[in-house]
Image (cartoon, rainbow, N blue to C red):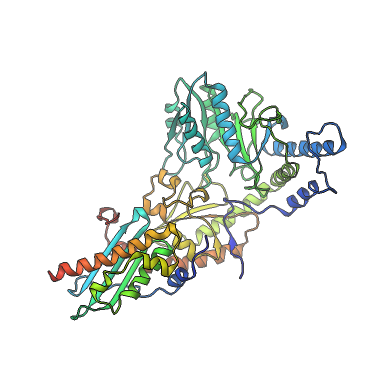
């Protein structure tokens, strides 16, 4: 099982690693996974008043595929509206990164992470 | 592309050139290719001579009589033969077996199979340093216990069990004692003339011999009998049928002879290098050595870098070939069952790396590995939300995780 090129690329050059202010009203934070499973992702999005995601940051504890899935997601959501971001499917991540079957759960977790971040954002607005 | 530095000697070892050269003499028309069981001609006699010599070489390393060595296809087969062989031969005496949760799958899965056939097995918990508590062992013995199987050195954490004491207790209770010595033979000294052990499994490929070759020590004094698991011709005194693979056997013999000659010196060198590797991480935060550091085979270092997941670290340090959890469980998503049996939290088990060094490891290899690991652990901690939480003083055991 050699590591996929795209997965390695995201690991070597991760996009958008970091932290946003979780208390800000226009920031949504999603934390999913558990150390027991070997995968924990924290995904944060910052939205402008037009509902467009202008910044996204992530941190992940997990294998290379998990790191790549969450890194890729932060790339994809920038410039999208919150509704568009919630449409992203894990299968698109699998295809883009060429994840093997045993790593599909990493893409599922990434999809959960963006949904959790959006949910957190909406709960602040509400 | 340069090949990575090999630091996974516990998974397998390269065949020593001296061993490979000798093996090659038993293959082609120009060599001694005969069937060792061909009693009637020169070709058979030559092969038989080579097999006899190898049998003595193996016996000599472990203080056994050559007649007590049974050739097998590897330690997995030896474990199967020992455990099933005893269970099925002596089942009228009792149907209870004792073993340890940290045994190799070759022992655990064999025990599971016997459970399906009506035997009862007790899987003991080790102490948190990986060692077996003698009192716990003694308390587990019942009237109907016939066999105990405890490995000498654990493949993941390298800890050495006190097989002298365990064996003494087995003798006192008239239980057969089997020891899986795949990871210990040729690395630490074994003297079966004085050890109270009835059966012992050996592997060739862990000690610079070929893969697909092993042996089982079966004591003659006191005499141990087994039900054969491979039938067909009655080879190896009826205990293991099948034409003997002369080249494989010669390889194992030569590897064991080299080990006998070089074990002491090599052990010192390897221990020095392993300790150098350990020193290289000693001033890092949140680093845990898994398993007792003293009662440990020279080449093993199993270490957890907290808050960094093991597979991502292995990918990051791909210039060094190591493993995270044992090779046998690498296909599953679960953390190492050995580490969990020590009481390690799941995340520490997921964060573990096993470095196992050996004959061809150099000081430069160790220094390069230290540099690489330190750099990548730092990088992965920068990526880790758990490291952030730790730095903020959050106790991770109190967090409600949103797992599936």
**Residue closest to the eye, B301 or B53:** B53
Instruction: Tell me where residue A14 appears, x and y as whole percent.
Output: 40, 73
Image quadrant containing the C terminus of chain B: bottom left
Q: Residue furthest right?
A: B42
Q: Is B69 above or below relative to B298? A: above
Q: What residue is at 39 percent from the left and 63 percent from the top?
A: A66
Query: How many numbered callouts?
Result: 0
Q: Is B322 above or below relative to A27? A: above
| B37 relative to B324 in the view: left or right | right
Instruction: Tell me where residue A48 appears, x and y as whole percent.
Output: 21, 80
Residue B332 in view of the camera: yes
Residue B181 in view of the camera: no
Image quadrant containing the N terminus of chain B: bottom right
Instruction: Tell me where residue B247 appears, x and y as whole percent.
Output: 75, 45
Q: Within the image, what quadrant is residue B360 found in?
A: bottom right
| B328 relative to B2 in the view: left or right | left
Instruction: Tell me where residue B133 appears, x and y as whole percent.
Output: 44, 35
Q: Is B393 above or below relative to B300? A: below
Q: Within the image, what quadrant is residue B243 found in?
A: top right
């Amino acid at each position: 099982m050699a590591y996929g090129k795209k997965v390695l690329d995201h690991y070597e050059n991760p996009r958008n690693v970091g932290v946003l202010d979780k208390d800000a009203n226009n920031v949504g934070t999603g934390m999913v996974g558990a150390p027991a499973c070997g995968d924990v992702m924290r995904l944060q999005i910052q939205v402008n008043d037009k509902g467009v995601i202008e910044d996204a940051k992530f941190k992940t504890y997990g294998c290379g595929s998990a790191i790549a899935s969450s890194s890729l997601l932060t790339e994809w959501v920038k410039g999208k509206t919150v509704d568009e971001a919630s449409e992203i499917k894990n299968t698109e991540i699998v295809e883009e990164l060429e994840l093997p079957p045993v790593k599909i759960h990493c893409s599922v977790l990434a999809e959960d992470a963006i949904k959790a971040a959006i949910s957190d954002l909406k709960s602040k607005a509400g | 592309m340069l090949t990575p530095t090999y630091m996974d000697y516990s998974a397998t070892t390269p065949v020593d050139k001296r061993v490979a050269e000798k093996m090659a003499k038993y293959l082609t028309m120009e060599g001694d290719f005969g069937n060792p069981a061909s009693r009637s001609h020169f070709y058979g006699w030559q092969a038989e001579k080579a097999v006899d010599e190898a049998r003595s070489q193996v016996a000599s390393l472990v203080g056994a009589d050559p007649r007590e060595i049974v050739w097998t296809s590897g330690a997995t087969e030896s474990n199967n033969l020992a455990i099933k062989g005893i269970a099925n031969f002596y089942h009228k005496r009792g149907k209870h077996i004792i073993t340890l949760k940290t045994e190799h799958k070759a022992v655990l899965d064999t025990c599971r199979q016997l459970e399906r056939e009506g035997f009862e097995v007790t899987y003991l918990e080790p102490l948190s340093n990986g060692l077996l508590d003698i009192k716990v062992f003694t308390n587990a013995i019942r009237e109907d216990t016939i066999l105990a199987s405890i490995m000498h050195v654990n493949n993941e954490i390298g800890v050495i069990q006190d097989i002298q004491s365990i064996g003494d207790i087995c003798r006192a209770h008239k239980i057969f004692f089997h020891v899986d010595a795949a990871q210990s033979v040729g690395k630490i000294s074994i003297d079966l003339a004085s050890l109270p052990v009835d059966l012992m499994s050996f592997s060739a490929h862990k000690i610079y011999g070929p893969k697909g070759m092993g042996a089982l020590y079966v004591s003659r004094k006191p005499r141990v009998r087994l039900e054969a698991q491979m039938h067909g011709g009655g080879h190896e005194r009826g205990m293991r049928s099948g034409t003997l693979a002369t080249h494989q056997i010669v390889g194992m013999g030569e590897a064991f002879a080299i080990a006998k000659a070089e074990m002491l010196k090599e052990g010192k060198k390897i221990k020095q290098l392993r300790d150098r590797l350990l020193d290289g991480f000693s001033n890092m935060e949140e680093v845990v050595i898994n398993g007792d550091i003293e009662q440990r085979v020279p080449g093993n270092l199993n270490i957890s870098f907290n808050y960094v997941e093991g597979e991502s670290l292995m990918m990051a340090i791909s210039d060094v070939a190591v493993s995270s959890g044992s090779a046998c469980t690498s296909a599953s998503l679960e953390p190492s069952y050995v580490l969990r049996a020590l009481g390690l939290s799941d995340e520490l088990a997921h964060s573990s790396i096993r470095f196992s060094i050996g004959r061809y490891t150099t000081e430069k290899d160790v220094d390069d590995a230290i540099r690489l690991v330190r750099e990548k652990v730092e990088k992965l901690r920068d990526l880790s939300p758990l490291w952030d939480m730790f730095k903020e003083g959050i106790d991770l055991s109190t967090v409600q995780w949103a797992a599936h």
